Image (cartoon, grey):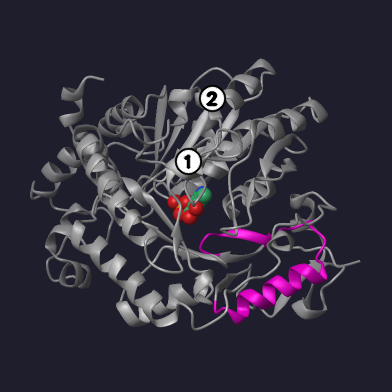
Amino acid sequence: MDLKIHLETPIYTEIDRYSKSKIIHFDVPGHKKNPNSPIAEAFGDRIALLDANSTKDLDVLSNPTGVISKAESLMADAYNSDYAFMLVNGSTSGVLTMIMSACGPKDKIIMPRNVHKSAVNGLIMSGAIPVFIDPGIDPEYGITNGITYNAVKEAIMENSDVKGIFLTNPTYFGTVSDLKSIVRLAHRHGIPVLVDEAHGSHFPFHPDLPDAAMSLGADMSTVSIHKTGGSLTQSSVLLVNEGLISKEKVRSIINLMQTTSASYLLLASLDLARKNLVINGNKIWGELLSVCEKAKTKIRKIPGLSVISRDDYVNGKEIYDYDDTKLVVRVNELGLTGFEVYDLFKAKYNIQLELAETYVVLAITGPGDNEDSFNLLVKAFENLSQEYYGERAPFRIPMADFFERPKTVIAPRDAFYGIKKSVPIQEASGEISGESIMIYPPGIPLVIPGERITDQIIEHYNFYVKQNCIIINDDGNTNFIKVLGE
Ligand SMILES: Cc1ncc(COP(=O)(O)O)c(C=O)c1O
């Protein structure tokens, strides 16, 4: 890679120049960069100055030919892909675009059931029919992992007409599948591989991180640069390798859904993050991996806690590789659930963890971390252990039940658009769901449109409510669920 070209930041440089050019604005946005506007007063003049609409100077995200086009080429180079499309509606819009680019109504797509809700939305919007496969399960940590080569192979053998394979790589918890072999297998059958790489934006920039999807030959990948890559929240990128997927189709699908008024703060932040990733990424992630390793060594010694590390977690089959910048800490031996620890950390130590699951909490690390913040995190775990270890029996529940896949009765799109009625969730057993209900984060639905609701799903829902989890459904009334009517 030619590092020199990555010193450039075409969008940031142009918006910076434009913001200082004393233009008299008779265009939108209506705050007109006025230093007395509420926006400038609340956020500072610079934010108002950098907030502009598309113009000939600034280029247009939906059909770029100028600075955005240059920035997208640099992004593609950074991620070793043929093309990059900047996104201002998160990886959600990238996931939707990937599925809609590969599949139309009634086309089959292979995917694990533990996908983010955006993939379920992609099924609804495209009309594609999911061929769900089971992800690996780790009952000790109570988490789901990636999908295996053999599971994909079996699904292809049974469904030779599939139009795409969608996978989450890495998972939220950092596990990675054997993507290289899966891509090779899929391509032998002419099937494109679409990767939700929302949590892997840092992968290409250090040799001790897992390989990134594009360099392994995947056809599309959506990367949340805002999650671990350092850009502003909501900014993301969709990468495309040409061959099985047409770049023109991808562009037209993005333009179906994306705003015509993209924020230059978000776009410029992608530019700045890409420069930093390419120029400084090796140093940043080298240091981060080393601090993470030290923290993991300390956490491992704390009574009642265990933590996942690449060295003892990767087994080559179910778990092909692991992102050691993730801190997945098992806390249930303290007699607490992950959800309780998540709340305790915020209340007692002012530490905001990324998410909780029944047995674990997840701390996400990133380029903005430093050794002090790690020390505070480790100290909080030590205090937690001192207070709870040996005081309560370990918390355990039948984990396998939690991961039983609901039965799909009707295609998600047909269920979503079907005639629905609202029923109390406690009385919904046996009904077919007309909506998704999920715990956020991670945003993996408990039930999706078209699946049969069971006693077990209601029991799990009640458990999450009792654990004070954030529950998200279609309309905010989480005591009720929309089910299919007559
Ligand atoms: C695995 C996964 N995919 C996709 C998304 C959606 O990304 P975004 O929040 O950037 O829209 C998320 C968000 O948490 C996620 O965890």
Q: Nearer the viewer, residue 90 or 224?
A: 224
Do the residues under discs 2 and 1 have CB atoms within 8 angstroms? no
Does 348 appear in magenta?
Answer: no
Q: Count up the numbered dots.
A: 2
Dot 2 or dot 1, earlier in sequence: 2
- Splitting the image into 4 quarters, where does residue 204 fall? top left
Across and down, in percent, residue 202 comes to 34, 40
Q: Is residue 473 visible?
A: yes
**What is the magenta range?**
440-468
Across and down, in percent, residue 258 comes to 47, 46
Q: Which residue is mark 1?
A: 197
Q: Which residue: 32% across, 30% down?
A: 207
Q: Nearer the viewer, residue 401 or 120?
A: 401
Q: Which residue: 70% across, 37% down?
A: 110
Q: Is residue 92 visible?
A: no
Q: Amino acid at mark 2?
A: Lys
Is residue 207 placed above or below 254 in the rendered structure? above
Neighbours of disc 2 within 10 Å: few (<14), some (14-19), many (20+) = some
C-alpha span from label 2 to label 1: 14 Å
Across and down, in percent, residue 36 comes to 13, 71
Is residue 374 placed above or below 96 in the rendered structure? below
Q: Amino acid at mark 1?
A: Glu
Q: Secondary structure at mark 2?
A: helix
Is residue 474 placed above or below 238 in the rendered structure? below
Q: Which residue is mark 2?
A: 180
